[in-house]
């Protein structure tokens, strides 16, 4: 930030009121080709204005009233230094080169350009494309970006939060089915979280259009803020007993995948892509390729039971073979596990039922409860940084609270086993 210019005659309201002549402009240079002017009218109140040299003429711009008799609010009533900052901002905006004038761009056109770029430079293209097609284009496809307003975007964002979640449907289905309207606090929080994620995608499309010169102003969407406290994670993980029951309840060909997730914390896609050559029995490490979600490869160490498990899984296979295959010998597909896990949860009495990702949470949560630090857990999970890890597992790593509570007195309470022994 540039240093503010000092001016004894104009800096304080006391000195400004001492100026001999009213209705006269007093200027102080505050930047190259930029001056801040002050005029006190015959009625007594002062005003600020900026004077900018454009290269061929001076341009004047009123900034607001001076705080001669009113308290400054930083917007309409300004101190000397606030007026100086506002004059600098005005000059910077006025000096911006004009964008080339062309055909106004619709949101649909901007979305196409964004997805084309995203496909080449980012991962999770299918998920992003699905979000754009399902939630953004139906509402905004033919809307000119230059005509989008803050109230319109806010109403759309709020509507997303109250609309029931979509049900998974087959490719043959032509009608969208919805779940029940969110009713519980957790369901409402979840819908707000989803609305925030969709808003992030919309803003990404619009920001790229702004950076690419398709539109000259980003104020409309910059003013729309996500819902607060909506993205607090609710981390569901299994106990050791629940994990054992679940493994035993799984179908024979699905059971190795569940075990592998508990032993490694890997995502479903990482495990289904895993090849025999990626399992090193000598070092006790498995290698997760850079095709993973984070875009970076990582090595995961195995404990003795995990190493023995993987040794059994790759027995008799060549390096290019998949470690995990379905019962018919075919590779696992994107959603092949969903019904199998649902059935296993029902048989193992896991309530509420879990998704495959909760096995990853179970791996990390177990490590956290054992006192493993967040940085180590972050590296094992392949997180980009510890902020993601901290959001989910920091509360489990904090043994300070547990140690503090352990010092509390019993308040006269005796465990049932002790009472029975005394009797």
Image (cartoon, grey):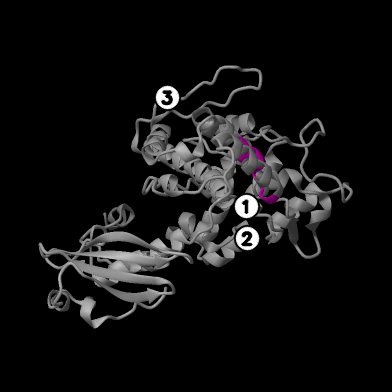
In the image: residue 141, left or right of residue 186:
right
Q: Residue at x 48, y 23 (%)?
A: 178
Which secondary structure lies at badge 1? loop
**365 inside magenta stretch:** no
Give how far across and how far down residue 422 sits, in percent.
27, 58
Q: Of the residues under marks 1 and 2, which one precedes in the sequence?
A: 1
Q: Give the range drawn in magenta.
A: 121-129
Q: Residue at x 79, y 55 (%)?
A: 278
Asked whether the beta carbons under mark 1 and mark 2 sit within 8 Å of each other, the answer is: yes
Q: Distance between the residues labelled 1 and 2?
A: 8 Å
**Which residue in the structure is indicated by mark 2?**
380
**Which residue in the structure is indicated by mark 1?**
265
Which secondary structure lies at badge 2? helix
Callout in the foreground (3, 2): 3
- Badge 1 density bin: few <14, some 14–19, many ≥20, Cα 10 Å: many
Q: Which of 380 and 199 is in front in this view?
A: 199
Which secondary structure lies at badge 3? loop
Q: How far apart are marks 1 and 3 (CA)?
A: 32 Å
**Which residue in the structure is indicated by mark 3?**
180
Q: Quadrant of the C terminus?
A: bottom left
- Badge 3 density bin: few <14, some 14–19, many ≥20, Cα 10 Å: few
């Amino acid at each position: 930030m540039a240093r503010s210019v000092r001016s004894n005659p104009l800096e304080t309201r006391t000195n400004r009121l001492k100026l001999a002549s009213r209705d006269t402009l007093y200027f102080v240079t505050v930047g190259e080709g930029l001056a801040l002017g002050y005029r006190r009218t015959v009625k007594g109140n002062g005003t600020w204005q900026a004077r900018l040299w454009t290269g061929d003429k001076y341009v004047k711009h009123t900034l607001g009233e001076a705080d001669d008799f009113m308290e400054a609010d930083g917007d309409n009533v300004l101190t000397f230094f606030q007026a100086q900052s506002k004059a600098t901002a005005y000059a910077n905006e006025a000096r911006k080169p004009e964008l080339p004038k062309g055909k106004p761009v619709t949101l649909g056109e901007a979305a196409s350009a964004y997805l084309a770029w995203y496909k080449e430079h980012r991962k999770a293209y299918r998920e992003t494309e699905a979000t754009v097609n399902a939630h953004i284009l139906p509402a905004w496809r033919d809307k000119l970006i230059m005509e989008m307003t803050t109230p319109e975007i806010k109403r759309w964002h709020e509507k997303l939060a109250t609309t029931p979640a979509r049900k998974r449907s087959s490719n043959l289905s032509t009608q969208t089915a919805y779940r029940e309207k969110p009713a519980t606090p957790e369901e409402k929080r979840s819908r707000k979280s989803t609305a925030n994620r969709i808003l992030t995608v919309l803003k990404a499309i619009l920001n790229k259009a702004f950076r690419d010169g398709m539109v000259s102003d980003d104020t409309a969407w910059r003013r729309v803020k996500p819902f607060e406290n909506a993205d607090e994670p609710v981390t569901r993980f299994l106990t050791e007993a629940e994990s054992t029951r679940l493994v035993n309840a799984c179908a024979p060909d699905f059971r190795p995948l569940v075990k592998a997730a508990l032993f490694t914390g890997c995502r479903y896609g990482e495990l289904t892509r895993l090849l025999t050559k990626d399992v090193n029995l000598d070092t006790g490490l498995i290698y997760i390729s850079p095709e993973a979600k984070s875009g970076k490869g990582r090595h995961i160490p195995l404990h003795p039971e995990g190493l023995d498990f993987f040794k059994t899984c790759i027995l008799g296979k060549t390096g290019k073979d998949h470690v995990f295959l379905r019962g018919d010998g075919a590779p696992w597909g994107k959603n092949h596990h969903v019904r199998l896990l649902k059935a296993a949860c029902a048989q193992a009495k896991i309530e509420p039922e879990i998704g495959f990702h909760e096995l990853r949470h179970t791996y990390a949560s177990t490590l956290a409860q054992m006192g493993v630090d967040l940085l180590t857990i972050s590296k094992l999970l392949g997180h980009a940084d510890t902020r993601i890890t901290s959001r989910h597992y920091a509360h489990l790593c904090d043994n300070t609270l547990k140690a503090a509570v352990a010092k509390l007195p019993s308040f006269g309470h005796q465990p049932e086993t002790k009472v029975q022994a005394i009797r």
